[in-house]
Amino acid sequence: MILFDSHAHFPADTAAGHAAQIARARDAGLCGLLAVGGSEDIDAGALTLAKQYPGFVHLALGYDRDTATTVAGSPAALSAAMSRLRERITRLSDDGSPLCAIGEIGLDFSRNPDPAEKSAQTALFEAQLLLAAELDLPCSIHSRDADDETLRILSRSASKARLAETRMGVIHCFTGGTDFASALVALGLHIGISGIITFRNAAPLRGTVSTLPRDRLIVETDCPCLTPVPMRGKPNEPALIVHTAARLAEVLGIPAEEAALITTSNAMRLFGILK
Ligand SMILES: [Zn+2]
């Protein structure tokens, strides 16, 4: 089976185990993964692994919603942060480790942020979508309890060219309903399927996923969180993507190898990775 984990985090506090995780990922049949940043801590882990395992660990960096109040507290702070990110991306590309995506970025209104934080999250999300369009990079996007706002911002920033190429990005760890999914697909987005699809109470999600176009589905661990069934209780890691891909195959009514192949080639195309 050929698999690609399209969203993995490598926080500093588990750094001692990262090399073993990469070895197990290779043994499990992964041909690569996207190490996703979003804050100083997880950016560092992603960068280290991308340098250590070129061609296997691919890189996404950005500012996630938890950084919004500091990074996008004022227009001046936001524009300075965007310059830093642009410079960082240019430097990485000059060093031979180009970014495959900006991420993770997006909105999380689940803890009921106050209006000032909401608008900082929104401004930060929009600014990074603009930068991604300018650099022609896809985005790894988080959206929790913010479907309407996510759609509003995405439709505003979707250009015809990027829509036609369907390289806008992915709504990672998708848990929304059928309406949200179809609106995202219409905007050219991919849908990231995490271990949640294996959960006992995820029948509605499985129903939605079964209706989606297969050329927009990719799989992810979002490790170290969201360990799939039957490995619940253990920390998640890229090798465990096999369980998520197998459950997705059941949902789609196709062999596991086929689901692995489809999601891997979708991810490679989306992130511009040639094999
Ligand atoms: Zn994540």
Image (spheres, grey):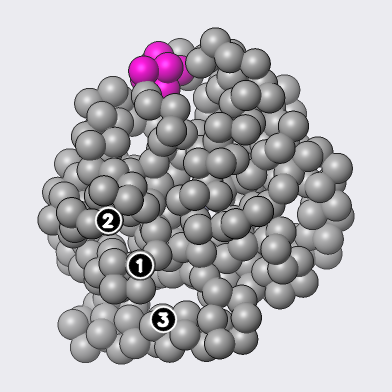
Under circle 3, the secondary element is helix
SS class, disc 1:
loop
Could you say which disc has been placed on residue 85 in the image? 3
Measured as percent of width and height from the top left, residue 11 is found at 65, 63
Left or right: residue 248 compared with residue 169? right
Residue type beneath disc 1: Asp
Q: Is residue 187 above or below residue 233?
A: below
Residue 13 position within the rendered picture, expressed as x and y whole percent measured from the top left: 72, 64
* Residue 17 seen anywhere in this rendered image of the structure: no
Q: What residue does disc 2 label?
A: 162
Magenta span has 209?
Answer: yes
Q: Quadrant of residue 75?
A: bottom left
State the residue at coordinates (19%, 57%). Answer: 159
Real-space CA distance between mark 2 and mark 3, rounded to the nearest whole angstrom:
21 Å
| Residue at left offset 13%, top offset 56% | 156
Labelled pair 1, 2 in contact (Cβ < 8 Å):
yes
Residue occupied by mark 1: 136
Residue 242 on the magenta span: no
In the image, 157: left or right of 36? left
The type of residue carrying mark 2 is Arg
> Does 196 sit above or below residue 123?
above
Disc 2 C-beta below 8 A from ligand 1: no
- Give the mark, 1 or 2, whose residue is nearer the N terminus: 1
| Mark found first going from the N terminus, 1 or 3 | 3
* Start-end of magenta stretch: 205-211
Characterize the magenta stretch by its predominant secondary structure: helix
Q: Could you tell me if the residues under marks 2 and 3 are in contact, i.e. CB atoms within 8 Å?
A: no
Q: Residue at x 46, y 51 (%)?
A: 270
Nearest the camera: 207 or 33?
33
Q: Residue 5: percent from the left, percent from the top?
A: 62, 45
The residue carrying pointer 3 sits among few (fewer than 14), some (14 to 19) or many (20 or more) residues within 10 Å by Cα, namely some
